[in-house]
Image (tube, helix red, strand yellow):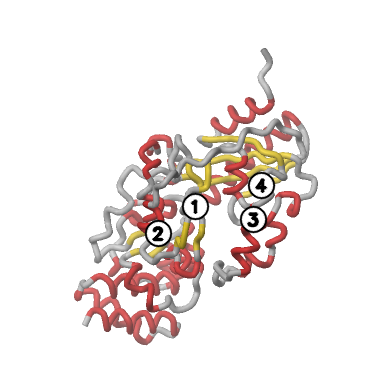
Amino acid sequence: MAMTIEQEIRNQAAALGFVSCGFARADAAPDAGDGLRAWLAEGRHGEMRWMEDRAEQRASPNGLWPAAKSVIALAMSYAPASDPLALADHGELGRISVYAQGGDYHKTVKKALKALGRWLAATHGGELKVFVDTAPVMEKPLAAAAGLGWQGKHTNLLSREHGNWLFLGIVMTSLELAPDAPASEHCGSCTRCIDACPTGAITGPGRIDARACISYLTIEHAGPIPEQYRAAIGNRIYGCDDCLAVCPWNRFADAAGANRAFLPRAELAAPRLADLLGLDDAAFRETFSGSPIKRIGRNRMIRNCLIAAGNSREVELKAAVEPHLVDPDPVVADAARWAMDRLG
């Protein structure tokens, strides 16, 4: 019996490192755009103006590319081998989100998507476009529509086979592909992710206020971190894994199936705050070369490390904090003053 085009694509995707592949019509998530518009209208996106600027393109694949008929949704695992919350009580160390401890996922996932796209075009023709999360595409609703999993109460994609440690990629194509059944929801009455959020940013099932989210505050937010959230940040200096780490479905996530490109770099798995606070711009770029962390720049990282230092109760860190009191960046200087006050 001849293999279907869908099975051929699944086989090729698996060979390229994707742990899951599914198919949906381009118009398979009609409600996603309404949810996006409501979220933006409430201002829950904070300073992420790029969410507003291309909202109508983001709302639907056909809004971005009218010729799209089908969507291929793909997932690549970055499941960690160790407990992401293990450093919570080590104030002298900075905590970096699991996804950013290895190589830049944008490059790894996009390279695999392009390889899949080249194979598909050469084998079956049609036009196509590939997307990681830098484009105005709603990957999570599309992945749910394609059967990869469902959006948990923390809004991230959840899979019964792979937990929630997944990077998503999308291929839009002009080909007509047989759609998969959308995934059903399996969170039940569990609220662990909501309860675990340090700042209460998850305001209800599937409702996130980015303005209170530690990932947003340490990565996307450019100004001073609001004082009401500083203590809750603890020693997190880039992102936050708490809502992901407590999900019971992660017991099925297999670290052995994670892409090796995402294995943690030794210097990013448990960095010392004192070392990071000593970085100038050149040293910052060298330290975070090839990492998604590089895009936030040295000043924002120093700001984050100063907040972590202030939360550390490690008086020895005052020597690393003090030089930043006269930093030319007022945001950095503000964080340094706060840290020094906290350290006594």
Crowding at mark 4 (Cα within 10 Å: few <14, some 14-19, many 20+): many
In this view, the mark in front (4 or 2)? 4
**Residue under pointer 1:** 104
From the viewer's perspective, tell me whether residue 223 is left or right of residue 74: left
Residue 198 figure quarter = bottom left
Q: Who comes first in sequence, dot 2 or dot 3?
A: 3
Q: Nearer the viewer, mark 1 or mark 3?
A: 3
**Residue at figure coordinates x 69%, y 49% from the top left:** 30
Instruction: State the residue position of label 2.
Output: 240
Q: Amino acid at mark 2?
A: Cys
**What type is the residue that disc 3 sits on?**
Ala
Q: Which-is-in-front pick, marks 4 and 1?
A: 4
Q: Residue at x 63, y 38 (%)?
A: 115
CB under 8 Å between discs 1 and 3: no
CA separation in Å, label 1 and label 3: 16 Å
Mark 4 to mark 3 CA distance (whole Å):
17 Å
The correct choice, above or below, for 302 with respect to 2 in the image is below
For numbered disc 1, what is the local secondary structure?
loop
Residue 165 horizontal/vertical position (percent): 44, 45
Depth check: 229 or 174 in front?
Answer: 229
